[in-house]
Amino acid sequence: MITSEVLCISEKNQPSLSLVSVADIRFFLQYGSIRLLIIVTNLGSISYLVKSKKFDYKKAVKLLNQTIQKYNEASDLKGYQEATKFFIKNCYKAGIIYEDK
C-alpha cells in the first residue's frame, strides 16, 4: 500500500448475521484513503473489501445508492441481507474486490 492509504479493521456485532452491512460499505467508500477494509463478525467470519487499481468512485457510489434503495424498500431481515448481497455481487463493476473467509 502507498503510505497515504489506510487499512481499516471493523469488528462488530452484526445482528443480521450478514458479512457486510450498508454502513460498512458507506464507510469504505466515504474515505478515499481506505483501500482495504477487513470486517470481523461476532461469529468469527472475516470479509474483505479492496479498492483495486480499476476502482471507479462514481460507479461505486451509483452501486451504493442502488443498494441503499433496495435496503430502504426491504421490510424484513431477508430483504436487508439481499440488499447487501446485491452490492457484493456487483461491486466488481466498480473495481471493488470482495472476499470472505
Image: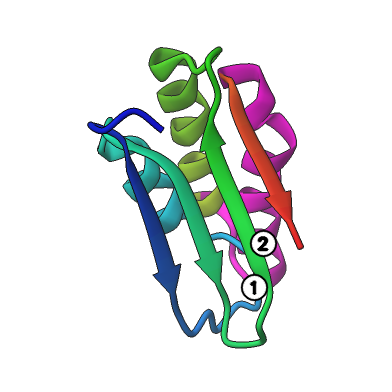
In which quadrant is the C terminus drawn? bottom right
The picture places residue 3, in percent across and down from the top left corner, at 26, 33
Q: Nearer the viewer, residue 72 or 44?
A: 44
Prevailing secondary structure of the magenta residues: helix
Q: Nearer the viewer, mark 1 or mark 2?
A: 2
What residue is rendered at 67% in x and 62% in y? 81
Q: Is residue 29 found left or right of 50 in the rendered image? A: left
Q: Nearer the viewer, residue 3 or 69?
A: 3
Q: Quadrant of residue 43?
A: bottom right
Which residue type does callout 1 highlight? Answer: Leu
Q: Is residue 77 found left or right of 67 in the rendered image? A: right
Q: Is residue 39 above or below residue 82?
A: below
Asked if the stretch drawn in magenta spans residue 75, the answer is: yes
| CA gap, disc 1 and disc 2 | 6 Å
The 10 Å Cα crowd at callout 2, few under 14, some 14 to 19, many 20 or more, is many
Q: Nearer the viewer, residue 19 or 100?
A: 100
Q: Which residue is mark 2?
A: 81
Q: Which residue is mark 1?
A: 77
What residue is rendered at 46% in x and 14% in y? 56
> Is disc 1 placed on a helix, strand or loop?
helix
Q: Quadrant of residue 50?
A: top right
In which quadrant is the N terminus drawn? top left
Q: Is residue 10 above or below residue 30?
A: below
What residue is rendered at 27% in x and 38% in y? 30
Which residue type does callout 2 highlight? Answer: Gln
Q: Which residues are magenta?
A: 73-94
Q: Is residue 93 found left or right of 34 in the rendered image? A: right
The 10 Å Cα crowd at callout 1, few under 14, some 14 to 19, many 20 or more, is some
